[in-house]
Image (spheres, rainbow, N blue to C red):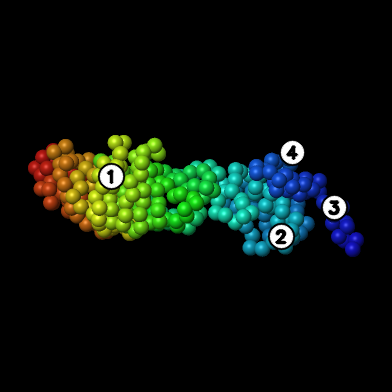
């Protein structure tokens, strides 16, 4: 009908250039914006012709996609416009394979409690407060590489063809089908505790691996895999992942560091108390009640100044 022909004839030059540029996007891994093209103006004109819902400016972050699309031309123009505003975050593969980020992405767990995330392949991670997990570029293409700072709990979707490797302080932990905990804040090195299945650990990529089975614990540092304790894993190793802090024979200095990450306060410990070892379970309560409870067991006192707590031996407060 003549209406269809007139619609094609009335297409604005910028709109035609948007559609022409689509061919370049399909044929190239990195889209290039045609010189002088005003994508936002093209989208607004297309919307006016086809009576779509209001167009959200593409320069605004977190663009929300309308619930449905009537016009194929608008869908093409909008998709192209969004593709042109930034770097692709994920690979698009026609095979349907899981694709990871093209650039490394870092997730930082906020203070106050554990934070969880699910990776592109369905593997699950829980991070302790203040911990950082970097998903390396190309995750899931032929390898799944992550870098951890702090503490992390991992439940891995196993895939022999795509090794899952966590690097912490240079040490490598490779999944062999498992649930495991990595503590990169241990004073003696990176501590690995296997909850299910098995993992392979090594100090560097150039050293041989040591295999750990369910219940095994190992400490890895620059010297290698220095400690392996078969069947010594405990509930305390992963209790923090469910929001409960349990400590077994840890120094007061290490306990203070954990409380700082969880509660966002500064805890200063008198030098004579730093090496004192404590075992306690802290589930809920305020940071003040937690520190008071610990101090009582050590004949110590806690003094607060703003958000800084100082723990000293009783009677030594100024």
Q: Nearer the viewer, residue 86 or 182?
A: 182
Q: CA distance from mark 4 to mark 1?
A: 59 Å
- Of helix, strand and loop, which one carries label 1? strand
The N terminus appears in which quarter of the rendering? bottom right
Residue at the spot x=12%, y=51% of the render? 297
Q: CA distance from mark 3 to mark 2?
A: 18 Å
| Residue, disc 4 | 36
- Whether residue 235 is visible, yes or no, is yes
Whether tag 2 and tag 4 are in contact, CB under 8 A, the answer is no
Q: Nearer the viewer, mark 2 or mark 4?
A: 4
Q: Earlier in the sequence, mark 3 or mark 1?
A: 3
Q: CA distance from mark 1 to mark 2?
A: 60 Å
User: Residue 251, percent across and down?
Assistant: 19, 45
Q: CA distance from mark 2 to mark 4?
A: 25 Å
User: Residue 315, percent across and down?
Assistant: 9, 42
Q: CA distance from mark 3 to mark 1?
A: 71 Å
Residue, far right = 2
Q: Nearer the viewer, mark 3 or mark 1?
A: 1
| Residue, disc 2 | 52
- Of helix, strand and loop, which one carries label 3? loop
- Whether residue 182 is visible, yes or no, is no
| Residue, disc 1 | 219
Q: Earlier in the sequence, mark 4 or mark 3?
A: 3
Looking at the image, residue 14 sits to the left or right of residue 216; the answer is right
Looking at the image, residue 15 sits to the left or right of residue 142; the answer is right
Q: Nearer the viewer, residue 197 or 81?
A: 197
Q: Quadrant of residue 312?
A: top left
189 shown above or below 114: above
Q: Nearer the viewer, mark 1 or mark 2?
A: 1
| Residue, disc 3 | 10
Residue at the spot x=33%, y=46% of the render? 210
């Amino acid at each position: 009908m003549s209406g269809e022909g007139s619609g094609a004839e009335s297409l604005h030059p910028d709109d035609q250039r948007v559609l022409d540029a689509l061919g370049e996007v399909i044929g190239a891994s990195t889209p290039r914006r045609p010189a002088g093209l005003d994508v936002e103006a093209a989208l607004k004109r297309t919307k006016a012709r086809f009576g779509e819902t209001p167009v959200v400016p593409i320069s605004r972050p977190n663009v929300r996609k309308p619930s449905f699309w009537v016009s194929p031309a608008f869908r093409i123009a909008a998709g192209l416009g969004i593709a042109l505003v930034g770097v692709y975050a994920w690979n698009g593969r026609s095979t349907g394979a899981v694709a990871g980020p093209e650039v490394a992405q870092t997730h930082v767990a906020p203070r106050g409690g554990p934070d969880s995330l699910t990776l592109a392949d369905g593997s699950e991670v829980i991070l302790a407060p203040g911990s950082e997990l970097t998903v390396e570029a190309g995750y899931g293409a032929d390898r799944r590489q992550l870098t951890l700072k702090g503490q992390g709990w991992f439940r891995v979707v196993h895939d022999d063809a795509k090794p899952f490797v966590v690097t912490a302080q240079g040490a490598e932990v490779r999944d062999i089908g498992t649930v495991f905990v990595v503590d990169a804040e241990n004073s003696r090195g990176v501590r690995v505790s296997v909850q299910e299945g098995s993992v392979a650990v090594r100090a560097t990529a150039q050293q041989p691996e040591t295999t750990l089975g369910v219940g095994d614990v190992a400490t890895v540092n620059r010297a290698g895999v220095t400690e392996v304790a078969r069947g010594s894993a405990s509930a305390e190793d992963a209790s923090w992942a469910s929001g409960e802090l349990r400590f077994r024979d840890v120094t007061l200095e290490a306990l203070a560091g954990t409380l700082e990450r969880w509660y966002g306060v500064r805890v200063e410990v008198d030098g004579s108390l730093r090496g004192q070892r404590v075992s306690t379970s802290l589930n809920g309560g305020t940071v003040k009640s937690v520190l008071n409870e610990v101090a009582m067991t050590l004949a110590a006192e806690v003094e607060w100044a703003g958000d800084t707590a100082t723990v000293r031996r009783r009677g030594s407060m100024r």
